[in-house]
Image (cartoon, rainbow, N blue to C red):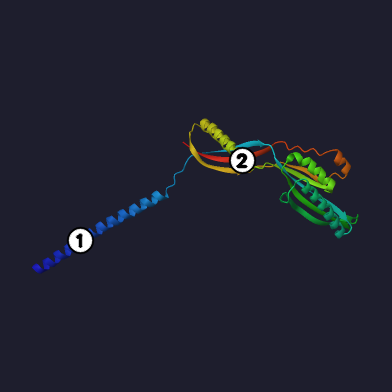
Amino acid sequence: MNNKLLAIATVAVAAVAIILAIGIFGTSYGQEADKAKVMYAADDVKIDKSILTAAGEGKVMAKPDRATINMGVQTEDKDAKTAQTQNAQKMDAVMKKLKALGISDEDIKTSQYNVFPQYDYNNDGKSTLRGYQVVNMVNVTVKDTAKLGDIIDQATQAGANRMDSVAFAVSEPDKYYNEAIAKAIEQAKEKANVMANTAGVKIKGTINVSEAAAQSQPVYDMGGMEYAKDQAVAAVAPTPIASGQLEVKANVIVTFEIQ
C-alpha cells in the first residue's frame, strides 16, 4: 500500500514539473515571440513627413566669346562624278581659306556629306533624272566672335555657297550655369517661404533638390540657302553678325520639410 502511494506521489510530482516547465518555456517563448513582433514592427514603421515643394528658375546673361558656323559647298551636275569633283575642288579652297584665317584643324568638323539624285516630274507623275547634287557641310568653331562676319565673307569668296546656321556659346558654360542654379534655388526658397507663411506652417529644412532643365543656346538660322552668289557684293558689304547676350538658364525643384 505504501509502495502504491509512493508511486502515485511520484507521478503527481512529475506531472507538476512538466506543467511548470511548459508554463515557463511557454512564457519565455511567448516573450521572445512578442519581442520579435515588436522588433519587426519597429523596423517596419515609416514616418511620413509633411512636405512643401517649390520650383525655381535662375537666369544669367553672358557675353558669347565663341560661335559655330555650319557652312559648306553645294554643287550640281548631270554626272555624279563631275558634281563630286567640282564640290571637292571648291571645298578644298574653302578649307585652305579657313586655315589661313587662323581656324585650326580641330575646330573644323564635317557635319554632312551627301550625293542626291535630282529628278524632274511631269504632269502624269513620271520622273526623269536631271542630275546629281553634292552637299559637303562643316561645323566651324570661331573663338573670336569679332572676326565672325569677315570669316563668313572670305569663306563665301573662296567658294562656300551654303550657310545654314550660327550658334553662339561661352567658353566657360559651367561657370554661368552654376550661377543660374544658385539663383534658381534662391527663388524656390522665396516661393516656399511665401507659401508656408500663407498656409500657417514653418519650414524645418530642405529634403531634396533636383535639376529640372539644362541651359539653352541661341541658334540663328541662316535659311540653308545659297549664300553670296555675287562675290563682288560680298566684298563690298561685309556681313554684320551681332552675338548679343547669351541667356544661361537653370530650373530646379526643391522639396522642404514643414511642421
- Residue depicted at x 11% and y 68%: 4
Q: Earlier in the sequence, mark 1 or mark 2?
A: 1
Q: How far, Cα to Cα, is label 1 from label 2?
A: 82 Å
Q: Which residue is mark 1?
A: 17
Q: Residue furthest left?
A: 2
- Residue depicted at x 51% and y 30%: 197
* Residue 121 at x, y percent in the picture: 89, 55
Kind of residue at badge 1: Ala
* Residue 101 at x, y percent in the picture: 77, 45
- Circle nearer the viewer, 1 or 2: 2
72 up-or-down from 254: above or below: below
214 up-or-down from 7: above or below: above
* Residue 244 at x, y percent in the picture: 72, 36
Q: Across the whole image, how many numbered discs are drawn on residues?
A: 2
Q: Which mark is residue 202?
A: none
Kind of residue at badge 2: Lys
Badge 2, how many Cα within 10 Å: few under 14, some, many 20+? few
Residue 117 shows up from this direction: no
Residue 6 shows up from this direction: yes
* Residue 123 at x, y percent in the picture: 91, 54
The quadrant of the rendering that contains the N terminus is bottom left
The secondary element bearing badge 1 is classed as helix
Badge 1, how many Cα within 10 Å: few under 14, some, many 20+? few
Q: Is residue 36 left or right of residue 160?
A: left
149, 123: nearer the viewer: 149
The secondary element bearing badge 2 is classed as helix
Q: Is residue 120 left or right of residue 53?
A: right
172, 99: nearer the viewer: 99
32, 3: nearer the viewer: 32
Q: Which residue is mark 2?
A: 175
